[in-house]
Image: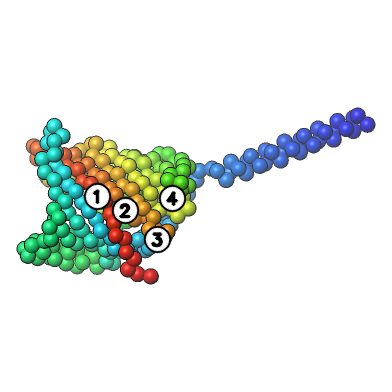
Amino acid sequence: MKKIFLSCMFASMALASATHTVSAADAASADAVPSVDVLTRTLAEKQKNLTALRHKYTYMEHEIVRERDSSGKVTREDKTDYEIRYVKDHTISRMLKKNGEALNTDEQASEDARVQKLLDEAGRTPVPASTVENVLTATRITDVKRITYKNVKALSLEFEPREGFSSRDKAEQLFSHLSGKMIVDEESGDMMHIDAKVATALKVLGGVAGELDVGSLLVIDTTLVNDEVRIAANEKRRILARKLLAKSDTEYELSYSNYKKTGN
């Protein structure tokens, strides 16, 4: 009887151990971070719908540009307000105010001509990629982690310049020189935050116009609008550049507001 009892007990323990092992394996599988290849494909597939939603909105962009001297002192500051809208999937920005004042007649004429040129080009130029697409295409993902960001289940992607990458447009060219971190909403695939710096110097117009220096930075945060898509909430850029023999340090501080949906 004792042998039978012990046999049953060991069998029960073995079964419990096997059950525990399977459960742990299932849990580990459920929590496993997708491979970079799988993640890249999944995120890329989600961008088309997100872009279509985002392009149904108009909003305001408030830009502050500060120029600093070698000691870091601000030597000039300009404030500009723009209306942002999308035409044929291209971003069209129209200046409304400069340093708090409406545009004068000459400035308005110049702005109208600039906007019309953008409208004309929209129909015959390639559609720009999203920030997520630029990161996935122009950089090399070096690490992926699951995190909780602002109470949202998210993925944190660390990236660096992709060696030998040949860019197709200016956005890809810029991102191909960046290293940093991008955070995306895991469920929707939408970008929540990006924090990056120029890791390898970028020549502007082949070096004729200067060089974007290592250490220049780009930080973007988004906000969820109408519980359907994330749109830029604020952005900061610090452009360290060499223009001919002079160095420049320009800081761009952007914020966004007044999101309005214009389509169904």
**Image marks 3 and 2: residues in contact by CB distance under 8 Å:** no
Residue 20 pos. (x, y %)? 69, 38
Residue 2 pos. (x, y %)? 91, 29
Q: Residue 144 carries which label?
A: none
Residue drawn at (41%, 48%), measured in percent from left and top? Answer: 184
Residue density around tag 2, few if under 14, some if 14–19, many if 20 or more, within 10 Å: many
For marks 3 and 2, the one nearer the N-term is 3
Distance from disc 3 to disc 4, alpha carbons, whole Å, reads 16 Å
Residue density around tag 1, few if under 14, some if 14–19, many if 20 or more, within 10 Å: many
Residue 159's place in the image compared with 56, above or below, is above
Q: Which mark is residue 226?
A: 3
For marks 3 and 4, the one nearer the N-term is 4
From the viewer's perspective, tell me whether residue 15 is left or right of residue 27: right
Q: Quadrant of residue 188?
A: bottom left
The colour scheme applied to this rendered structure is rainbow
For marks 1 and 4, the one nearer the N-term is 4
Quadrant of the rendering where the C terminus is positioned: bottom left
Residue 10 pos. (x, y %)? 81, 32
Q: Is residue 203 something one can see in this rendering?
A: no
Disc 1: which residue: 254
Label 4, secondary structure: give it: strand
For marks 2 and 1, the one nearer the N-term is 2
